[in-house]
Amino acid sequence: MSEPNWSDFRVVLALRNEGSIAGAARKLGVDASTVSRRLAAAEEAFDTTLIVRGGGDFVFTSEGLAIADAAEKMDATVNTTRINVRSMREEPRGTVQVACVPTAAHVLRPLVDEIAYKHDGLHVDLMSSISGIDLSKGDADVAVRTIPPKDPGLVIAYTFTWGSCLYASKDYLARHGRPETHEELRKYTLVRYGAPLLHAKAFGWVEKFAAPDRPATRVENSDSARVIIEQGGGIGPLFCAVGDTCSNLERVFPEPFDQMDAWVLYHESARGSHRVRLVLDAVVAFLRSKRSLLTGLE
């Protein structure tokens, strides 16, 4: 015996609402023989008689009426869902999730309020994380990441770079002086990153200037590095978008030592969503306007 499916419920509902096989056939857009076959299949699936036939008339059994009532509720739910989904795709309302690395969350935070102010009913959730976010599984709608996209379903909306410089607190430089060359960094306390991040130049570049006989602090993320550098814990690398916005930090050397590629991505399944497109366009426009901050270049 097969399990009931939505088609079984639909044919029972059409028969009750239209009052005849011919009427149900018109409603469903099929011929009368198809309705009869579907009814027989529904009765087999439910393992009970749903309609008692008598000539051209028929009478619903109590089981048939119960199924018709359930089908009516299901139909209302389906229609409501269809309307809501269409509205979500056509109207800029609802929530759009933007997954990003912590540095991007710092930069994009003002945009969240700007979008909420301009578009009543549209909200942006910033998901700051270094863990993997799978756009194809709906973990987020938009992603700002530094890992090259490999999934063929991902669409690149914008490409930019994060510039990195070495920073120190004003107090630290006042106490210890400023190195004049990269090689002189060996005389200073350095804030360094943990092994998982050292493959990226933005985090690992400073390693070659670390003297084994000098103290150092190792951190697992740029937020921790910023805090320690602000506290006067040494010289360390930060993205310019972070370091240049901290009033008590200064660049140790004027020019960025690295430019890291980054991408704004979305999944192709979101192409038709107006709310996602609106947020996506806003993110891209915002990042473009912040190019000098992001790259650290004038």
Image (cartoon, grey):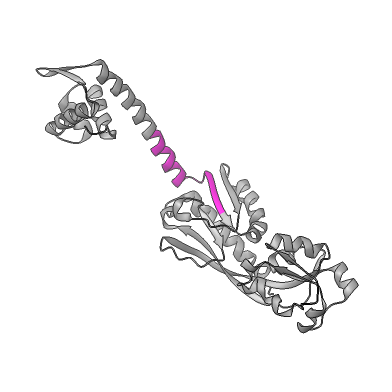
Furthest-right residue in view?
Answer: 175
- The location of residue 92, given as percent across then percent down, is 51, 46
Position above or below: 153 against 35: below
Residue 55 relative to residue 291: left or right: left
Residue nearer the viewer, 52 or 203: 203
- The location of residue 51, given as percent across then percent down, is 19, 20
- The location of residue 35, given as percent across then percent down, is 17, 31
* Residue 256 visible in the picture: no
The part of the chain drawn in magenta is 79-98
Residue 153 relative to residue 8: left or right: right
Q: Quadrant of residue 223?
A: bottom right
Instruction: Label the magenta part by its dominant secondary structure.
Output: helix
The residue shown at (44%, 46%) is: 89
Residue nearer the viewer, 162 or 274: 162
Position above or below: 107 against 251: above
Image quarter of the N terminus: top left
- The location of residue 91, given as percent across then percent down, is 48, 45
Residue 148 relative to residue 126: left or right: left
Q: Quadrant of residue 40?
A: top left
